[in-house]
């Protein structure tokens, strides 16, 4: 655990090779001042990573200002970012500073950057070119002294290829890219995290320490955590509050089989309260199950799979890596032969 927050509490838990790589890359990123694009599935710790880059870098004692791009209407983005002068529009009785000015000297964290509308993308692109901006209704330009970090939970390059994002903005943002690995490829980190969350919430609620029961520990390893660390944290939090036993049981959903028709349907009820998280989890479940069927059908042959499903090869490869699906586990079988024949005959 290398990073500590302002109150010296350890914030990052994890010892897997994939996570150690993240930590050492974060240490490097903290030493420079260039923009960083942090990509990763929902709940993988993108905001935590952004805070670690900020607080352990040279700007650490200046403000860290997060802004959720998905929550700003496209036409209000300039006023949110750059502020406005008095009388700039009907409701502007007072001048108001934007988040860029609030982050002066520190870091501006643009969360959910993939959600920016077309107009907002242009405004941000202009700002990133030389960090100059003008409050809405103002006539004087200012130059900001901020570091820009951005996070996305979709593959921004893929979104750009599909025409949903400006390529020039993508290039500005992805000078440095930090990929947060999904929890399912972090080995036993799920166990360490579960124990850390139990300790954190027991101390928060003044509860006595309690061990996680062995049955739940075993399940922690097998589950694929579509909501990643946040899903695990919420689960521990909830179960601790409801628990009445001597040990803590975690209600971990049983893992759907990787292949075959019994894979979990997308409509399966999910135990979450947050819509965005529930949606991301459902998409992750669908993609994983779809890909497993597809690769089983083509015996792990990606080119063939790409032709069958109408996606390009590099996107499929990326998904295969994202879900940790080993191609070698899909062996040649009659179905694959059938698929090949079907394609050859078209
Ligand atoms: N390695 C870690 N160690 C301890 N806590 C973690 C770790 N990674 C994430 N968390 C915790 O998990 C929760 C989710 O993390 P965070 O908000 O940074 O994820 P995110 O990738 O920004 O999610 P989203 O895409 O949904 O916005 C937070 O409460 C965070 O403190
Ligand atoms: Mg986040």
Image (cartoon, rainbow, N blue to C red):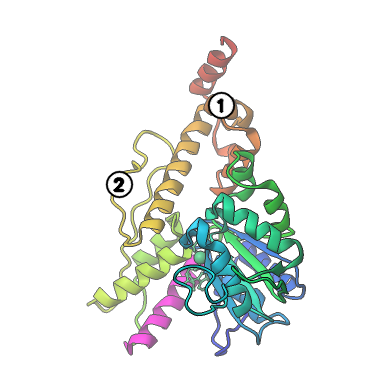
Q: Which mark is residue 332?
A: 1
* Quadrant the N terminus occupies: bottom right
Q: Residue at x 65, y 87 (%)?
A: 61
Query: Picture coordinates of residue 231 (x, y %)?
Result: 41, 63
Q: Which residue is mark 2?
A: 268
Q: Residue at x 62, y 80 (%)?
A: 3
In the picture, measured across the screen, residue 179 lies left or right of residue 142, that is left
* Quadrant the C terminus occupies: top right
Where on the picture, by quarter, is residue 40? bottom right
Q: Assign a secondary structure to mark 2.
A: loop
Is residue 282 shown to the viewer in this render? yes
Q: Closer to us: mark 1 or mark 2?
A: 2
Q: Give the CA distance from mark 1 to mark 2.
A: 31 Å
In the picture, measured across the screen, residue 42 lies left or right of residue 146, that is left
Q: Residue at x 61, y 43 (%)?
A: 158
Query: Picture coordinates of residue 202 (x, y %)?
Result: 36, 84
Neighbor class of circle 1 (other Cα within 10 Å; few <14, some 14-19, many 20+) is some
Do the residues under discs 1 and 2 have CB atoms within 8 angstroms?
A: no
Q: Is residue 335 above or below residue 134?
A: above
Magenta residue span: 187-207
Query: Picture coordinates of residue 308 (x, y %)?
Result: 54, 25
The residue nearer to you, when weighing 93 against 187, is 93
Q: Is residue 199 magenta?
A: yes
Where on the picture, by quarter, is residue 12? bottom right
Q: Is residue 222 above or below residue 230?
A: above
The residue nearer to you, when weighing 52 against 135, is 135
Is residue 15 shown to the viewer in this render? no
Q: Assign a secondary structure to mark 1.
A: loop
């Amino acid at each position: 655990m290398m990073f500590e927050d302002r109150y010296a509490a350890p914030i990052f838990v994890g010892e897997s090779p994939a996570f150690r790589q993240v930590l050492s890359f974060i240490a490097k990123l903290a030493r420079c001042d260039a923009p960083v694009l942090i990509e990763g599935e929902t709940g993988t710790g993108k905001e935590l990573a952004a805070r670690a880059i900020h607080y352990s870098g040279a700007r650490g004692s200046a403000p860290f200002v997060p802004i959720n791009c998905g929550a700003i209407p496209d036409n209000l983005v300039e006023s949110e970012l750059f502020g406005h002068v008095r009388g700039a529009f009907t409701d502007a009785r007072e001048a108001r500073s934007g988040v860029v000015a609030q982050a002066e000297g520190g870091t501006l964290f643009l969360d959910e950057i993939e959600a920016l509308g077309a107009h907002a993308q242009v405004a941000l692109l202009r700002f990133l070119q030389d960090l100059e901006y003008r409050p809405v209704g103002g006539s004087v330009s200012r130059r900001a002294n901020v570091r820009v970090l951005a996070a996305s939970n979709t593959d921004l390059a893929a979104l750009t290829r599909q025409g949903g994002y400006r390529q020039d903005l993508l290039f500005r943002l992805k000078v440095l890219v930090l990929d947060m690995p999904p929890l399912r490829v972090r080995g036993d980190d799920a166990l360490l995290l579960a124990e850390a969350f139990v300790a954190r919430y027991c101390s928060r609620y003044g509860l006595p320490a309690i061990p996680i029961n062995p049955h739940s520990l075993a399940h922690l390893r097998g589950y694929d955590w579509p909501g990643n660390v946040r899903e695990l944290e919420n689960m521990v939090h909830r179960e601790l509050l409801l628990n009445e036993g001597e040990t803590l049981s975690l209600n971990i959903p049983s893992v759907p089989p990787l292949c075959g028709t019994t894979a979990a349907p997308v409509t399966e009820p999910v135990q979450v309260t947050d819509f965005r998280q529930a949606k991301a989890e459902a998409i992750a479940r669908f993609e994983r199950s779809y890909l497993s069927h597809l690769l089983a059908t083509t015996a792990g042959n990606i080119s063939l799979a790409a032709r069958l499903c109408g996606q390009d090869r590099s996107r499929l490869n990326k998904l295969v890596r994202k879900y940790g699906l080993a191609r070698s586990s899909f062996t040649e079988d009659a179905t694959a032969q059938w698929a090949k024949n079907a394609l050859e005959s078209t």
